[in-house]
Image: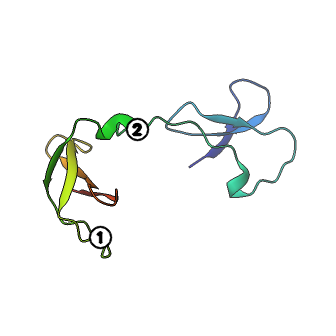
Amino acid sequence: MLVVSASSTSASNAFVCPTCPYEFPIAGLQMFERKSLPRKQVDDVLGGAGAWDNVDQTAAQCPVESCGNDRAYFFQLQIRSADEPMTTFYKCTNCGHQWREN
């Protein structure tokens, strides 16, 4: 969610993200459609393209009906608070579909 605030880099207003340093300066009166604002660059928290390298396989039914495979790669991450269980991420060994379980 972006909010309008005074820009830290210029004397004009800007769209500012309250949780990160992203800032989009507003120069004069402009109208924007939601999809035309430039997207900020984010890091892939799951490790990017190499996340599935050297992971184990387990017995897990692929949720894609046309696949029906019963093997999947998996890894676990703690993405919530420490008192919550780890989240398991799966990738089908046959069709490559990805899903997760809490």
Q: CA distance from mark 1 to mark 2?
A: 23 Å
Tag 1's secondary structure? loop
Which residue sits furthest bottom? 65
Check disc 2 and give the amino acid type: Ala
- Which of 43/54 is in front? 54
When the figure is inspected, residue 69 is found, relative to residue 93, above or below; the finding is below
Position of residue 58 measured from the top left corner of the image (x, y, whole percent): 13, 53
Position of residue 88 measured from the top left corner of the image (x, y, whole percent): 20, 50
When the figure is inspected, residue 27 is found, relative to residue 90, above or below; the finding is above
- Which of 40/11 is in front? 40
The residue located at (56%, 36%) in the rendering is 41
Q: Quadrant of residue 69?
A: bottom left
Check disc 1 and give the amino acid type: Cys
Position of residue 2 measured from the top left corner of the image (x, y, whole percent): 60, 46
Q: Quadrant of residue 97?
A: bottom left
Position of residue 5 measured from the top left corner of the image (x, y, whole percent): 67, 38
Q: How is the image coloured?
A: rainbow
**Residue 67 — which label?**
1
The residue located at (49%, 37%) in the rendering is 19
**Residue 49 — which label?**
2
- Which of 22/90 is in front? 90
**Residue 31 — which label?**
none
When the figure is inspected, residue 50 is found, relative to residue 3, above or below; the finding is above
Disc 1 or 2, which lies upstream in sequence? 2
Disc 1 vs disc 2: Cβ atoms closer than 8 Å?
A: no
